[in-house]
Image (tube, rainbow, N blue to C red):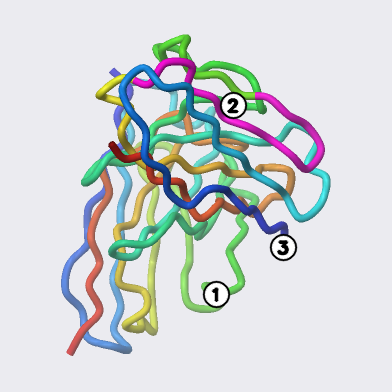
Amino acid sequence: EVQLVESGGGLVQPGGSLRLSCAASGFTFSDYEVNWVRQAPGRGLEWVSYISSSGSTIYYADSFKGRFTLSRDNAKNSLFLQMNSLRAEDTAIYYCARGGYYGDRWGQGTLVTVSS
Amino acid sequence: DIQMTQSPSSLSASVGDRVTITCRASQSISTYLNWYQQKPGKAPNLLIYVASNLQGGVPSRFSGSGSGTDFTLTISSLQPEDFATYYCQQSYSTSWTFGQGTKVEI
């Protein structure tokens, strides 16, 4: 069964850092591009970042450039989103989604709360 | 950035109704348009990809159409499990953008 499982969310103070993980199983992870999408409480979906199957190409939405870093370890079937300089407005559920043009499988999400 | 505008933002419908949701792109995106359904507390679920292709396992009452800047998602006969929020998403550019969502309520 195809699965994506996010972890690493939690409560962090403004200015702090968190590292989110996305663990994949049930498919050949190294064949797939992955996107991160977030959803603030009661709000819509917002694209965060993209990584190619090899990890050689990465894109970020402007709001996250310089603060977030996306990487992957294909040997461990895992993806990592390092988030620095977090702000209250970064409070959201963060999802990883398999696919480059569309997300055909999504994880359950991990909640990040930025608050003092 | 390509902006995606959905309408309506919400709608009330009954079981058995035909429902149509529209999505407009700020520039032509060919058919790089996808539709998702999201239920409360759950991740989005892909319904339609590349404008009109039904994702595996999705009931045939869902259909998509359009190209260029104007797209529609149609539910031919609304079922109780279809009450949810629907999002369009463009993948013409490397940075995805989503519509603001359409909440389908009873």
Earlier in the chain: of badge 3 and badge 2, it is: 3
Q: Quadrant of the C terminus of chain A?
A: bottom left
Vertical relation: B18 (above or below) A7? above
Magenta highlight on residue A11: no
Residue A18: horizontal and vertical position, in percent?
28, 71
Vertical relation: A66 (above or below) B9? below
Q: Name the residue under label 2.
A: B49
**What type is the residue that disc 2 sits on?**
Tyr
**What type is the residue that disc 3 sits on?**
Asp
Q: Give the range drawn in magenta.
A: B65-78
Q: Which chain carries label 3?
A: B
Q: Which of A32 and B94 is in front in this view?
A: B94
Tag 3, which secondary structure?
loop
Q: Are marks 3 and 2 in contact (CB under 8 Å)?
A: no
Residue A63: assigned label = 1
Determine the residue positioned at 54% across, 16% down. B54
